[in-house]
Image (spheres, rainbow, N blue to C red):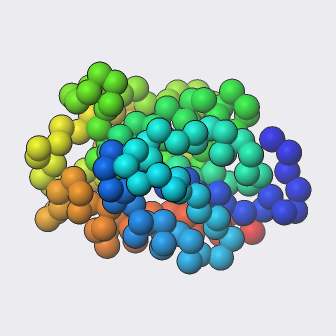
């Protein structure tokens, strides 16, 4: 990945899952931060199918943040591994109530290892995900369970949005 003075920014991919994307509040909060460019697919129904790897490779940035909800969480988790092949390291990975899409439901997902592992990772879980069955992340950090949330409201939680914005703010300070 080529770097220059213009690359001194944070590139954040915010990816929803199947159905109406729930991540708009997170994308808005991150886009209000100076030095952060947010990309979210325009597709409404199946954002998790977006080509995250190509987008990350094409956008020059020193800091990469991947945020995914539901099926989108599995997608950004897989993207950590793929972008590592181009020597791109994910600085911050956010998995919000991850759900496996292949095979559908109840799957254990592997946390990236070695140079594919993100520098920082947060996993947020809804207090009540029913009827959605979240996937288990094998080898990742302990999930943060957010009270009074369900699978679809978790992305709108002030607790989750504040935690993500605070982490990205810390990454911005570290670059200076």
Horizontal side of residue 147 vs 21, given as left or right: left
On the rendered image, what quadrant is the C terminus found in?
bottom right
The residue lying toward the viewer, choosing from 76 and 8, is: 76
User: Is residue 31 visible from the viewing direction of this image?
Assistant: yes
Query: Which quadrant would residue 99 be assigned to in this image?
Result: top left
Query: Which quadrant would residue 4 be assigned to in this image?
Result: bottom right
User: Is residue 146 visible from the viewing direction of this image?
Assistant: no
On the rendered image, what quadrant is the N terminus found in?
top right
Can you say whether 39 is above or below 28 in the image? above
Q: Residue at x 32, y 56 (%)?
A: 20
Q: Residue at x 21, y 53 (%)?
A: 151
Residue 132 location, x and y as percent? 17, 42
Q: Which residue appears farthest toward the right when viewing the image? A: 4
Can you say whether 133 is above or below 163 in the image? above
Q: Tell how many labels.
A: 0
Residue 22 location, x and y as percent? 34, 59
Can you say whether 74 is above or below 36 in the image? above
Residue 175 location, x and y as percent? 72, 63
Q: Residue at x 41, y 54 (%)?
A: 44
Horizontal side of residue 75 vs 7, given as left or right: left
The residue lying toward the viewer, choosing from 17 and 89, is: 17
Query: Which quadrant would residue 107 be assigned to in this image?
Result: top left
The residue lying toward the viewer, choosing from 24 and 147, is: 24
Q: Residue at x 66, y 45 (%)?
A: 56
């Amino acid at each position: 990945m080529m770097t220059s003075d213009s690359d001194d920014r944070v590139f954040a991919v915010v990816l929803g899952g199947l159905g109406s994307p729930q991540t708009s509040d997170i994308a808005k909060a991150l886009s209000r931060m100076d030095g952060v460019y947010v990309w979210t697919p325009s597709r409404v129904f199946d954002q998790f199918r977006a080509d995250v790897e190509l987008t990350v490779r094409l956008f020059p940035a020193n800091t990469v943040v991947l945020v995914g909800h539901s099926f989108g969480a599995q997608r950004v988790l897989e993207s950590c591994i793929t972008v590592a092949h181009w020597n791109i390291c994910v600085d911050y990975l956010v998995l919000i109530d991850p759900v496996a899409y292949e095979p559908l439901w109840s799957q254990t997902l592997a946390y990236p290892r070695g140079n594919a592992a993100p520098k920082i990772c947060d996993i947020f879980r809804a207090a009540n995900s029913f009827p959605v069955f979240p996937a288990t992340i094998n080898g990742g950090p302990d999930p943060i369970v957010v009270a009074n949330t369900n699978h679809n409201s978790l992305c709108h939680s002030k607790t989750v949005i504040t935690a993500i914005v605070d982490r990205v703010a810390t990454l911005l300070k570290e670059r200076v």
